[in-house]
Amino acid sequence: MTKLLILTVLVLVAIAIWQMTKIFELSQLKADSSNAQIANDSDNRTNGYLLFGFLIFIYGITIFSFAKYTKVLLPEAASAHGGEYDTLMWISFAIIFFVQTITQALLHYFGYKYRGEEGKKALFYADNDRLEFIWTIIPVIVLAGLIIWGLYSWTNIMDVNDEDDPLIVELYAQQFNWQARYGGEDNVLGDASVRLIDIDRANVLGLDESDPNSSDDIIVKELHLPVGRKVNFYMRSQDVLHSAYMPHFRAQMNCVPGMITEFSFTPTITTEEMRLNPDVVDKVKRTNAIRAEKAAKGIPNTDPWEFDYILLCNKICGKSHYNMQMKIIVETEEEYNKWIAEQGTFGDMMASAQ
Ligand SMILES: [Cu+2]
């Protein structure tokens, strides 16, 4: 209550000061008979120079951001389609950057060149069809090119099919964790529905026990993928909208309650190889330097970090959304086979729950 009162008093004081300034300004106007409100040549020149100053500022901040923050971007794409995606993004950036550099320079230069001057009259210039045609057709061609290229890439990337014997994996989202389910021996996922969830028997993903395909399914909390093999992901959500985001693979797909969404990609770089990537080495070094500094101050959770691929939730789905993640390990075919052989099946799990 006291806080509210203090706040009210402060607001009232601010209004009073503002009103008094206005009165003061009005009284000044009357006393000064010259036209102080109309900009003269000197004012216009100053504003022209300020425009140049602002131009230098925006160029400066752009160059500064490039130099300082480029290193926080993602490292090289670790999936087969990722290169195409990155090229599209960088070409778009380059075009935007080029056009912005030129148009801003022209805008500010003309602002200065045609600043107000005593006795100068603006030229009345109705229109010029040819000029309008040029400045319409160039953006049309460039944008149409980018959009068509984007659509082409999108259809290429989103083509989820069963060619090349893909590994079938389900990503199951719930507040606030991820689980992955492999098709098992037959590489076919058993039917599942949230209505079949049976917490008492640990059937947390609601697999249909009567479906013969479900007994060999393997449910895990860490995603392992063999390098070079296509993976078809099928996403489900138990509760709200989530989004399966795997930044290093340039992959993201919403997980929607009541439906199955799909995404497919082929991992091309193993976790071990990615840890040797110069950008990643650099990032690990920088992060661990910060962690070491914090550790010295006695702040907890500051153990040195090691790079791992990651699956994140990219929809703000609730209070622990930030912590909804799963480690992804890309490894050789042999390592993957060894790992998957060690995992228990859904059938085993149900048998032991009897
Ligand atoms: Cu989520």
Image (tube, grey):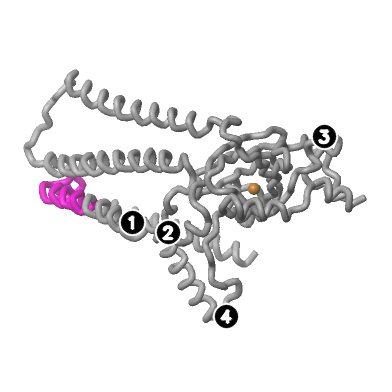
Range of the magenta residues? 31-54
- Give the Cα distance between marks 4 and 3: 53 Å
Q: Nearer the viewer, mark 1 or mark 3?
A: 3
Q: Which residue bears the numbered disc 2? A: 277
Q: Which comes before the other along the chain, label 4 or label 3? A: 3
SS at mark 1 in the image: helix
Q: Which residue bears the numbered disc 4? A: 298
Identity of the residue furthest to the right in this view? 354
Q: Which comes before the other along the chain, label 1 or label 4? A: 1
Amino acid on which the number 3 mark rests in the picture: Asp
Amino acid on which the number 2 mark rests in the picture: Asn
Mark 3 Cα shell of 10 Å, populated few (<14), some (14-19), many (≥20): few
The residue at label 4 has a CB less than 8 Å from ligand 1:
no
Mark 4 Cα shell of 10 Å, populated few (<14), some (14-19), many (≥20): few
Q: Which residue bears the numbered disc 1? A: 65
Relative to residue 140, is residue 350 depicted above or below? below
SS at mark 4 in the image: loop
Q: Marks 2 and 1: CB-CB under 8 Å?
A: no
Q: Which residue bears the numbered disc 3? A: 211
Q: Marks 3 and 2: CB-CB under 8 Å?
A: no
Residue 224 position in % (x across, y down): 62, 51
129 left or right of 344?
left
Q: Which comes before the other along the chain, label 2 or label 4? A: 2
